[in-house]
Amino acid sequence: MNRTRNENGFTLMELMVVISISVLIAYALFIAVQYGDEQVRTAQLSMTLQNAARESLYQMSQELRQTAPSQVPTGANGNSIQFNIPDPSNPIDADFTVNWTGALLIQYARGGLNNRQIIRTNMTTGTTSVIANDVVSLSFTGGAAPQLITITVGAQKSLPNGRLVPTQPLQMTAQAELRNN
């Protein structure tokens, strides 16, 4: 006896085609999300580098503003600078002039870990601190006994996979007018 069965459902071939298409769509979505996530991380890293460079420029220029042209013994050309700042505990004499007697000798230079940090050294006390990381260049210009010093910082992060962020080093510049005469 021949009975015709009314079969409902999918064949094995139809299921395999649907699963294959679903896997391809999921893979494409995964790649798109992964690329977007990488772009967000790169943008965040660039902003972090920019903020760190800006903060280091601000700190250096604020401290340089406390000195006088005659208190920059090594000039201001090169990748480091030394200068005197008034004694913080007694910056002004009784006659309202800057007290250079107890001045602190400060140095800013590139160094530290893989020569990629800006190091602030208080040469008077011997204390050091790192004020920026991922620095690829640092320069000070202004000549001997300058009134105005230009500071340029270049920053770039090298990722573990060898990729550089940003692709060209970020260059930031600030100027500090030496105010105390």
Image (tube, rainbow, N blue to C red):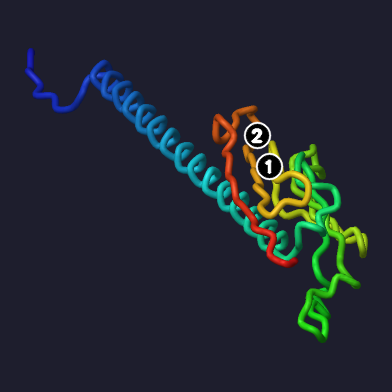
Residue at 59 percent across and 34 percent down: it is 169
Secondary structure at badge 1 equals: loop
Quadrant housing the N terminus: top left
Residue 133 place in picture, x, y as percent? 70, 47
Task: Determine the residue positioned at 45% across, 37% down.
Answer: 39
Residue 24 lies in quadrant = top left
Which three-letter amino acid code belongs to the residue tagged 1?
A: Asp
Question: Mark 2: few, some, or many residues within 10 Å (few <14, many ≥20)?
Answer: few
Q: Secondary structure at mark 2?
A: strand
Q: Quadrant of the C terminus?
A: bottom right
Q: Which mark is residue 158?
A: 2
Q: Nearer the viewer, mark 2 or mark 1?
A: 1
Looking at the image, is 104 positioned above or below residue 99? above
Q: Position of residue 156 (x, y in %)?
A: 62, 37
What is the crowding at mark 1: few (fewer than 14 residues within 10 Å), some, or many (at least 20)? many
Q: Work out whether 144 lies above or below 128.
A: above
Q: What's the mark number on residue 101?
A: none
Q: Position of residue 100 (x, y in %)?
A: 86, 70
Q: CA distance from mark 2 to mark 1?
A: 8 Å
Q: Residue at x 57, y 53 (%)?
A: 51
The quarter of the picture where residue 70 lies is: bottom right
Describe residue 28's horizontal placement relative to residue 89 as left or right.
Answer: left
User: Is 87 situated above or below 154?
Assistant: below
The residue under label 1 is: 134
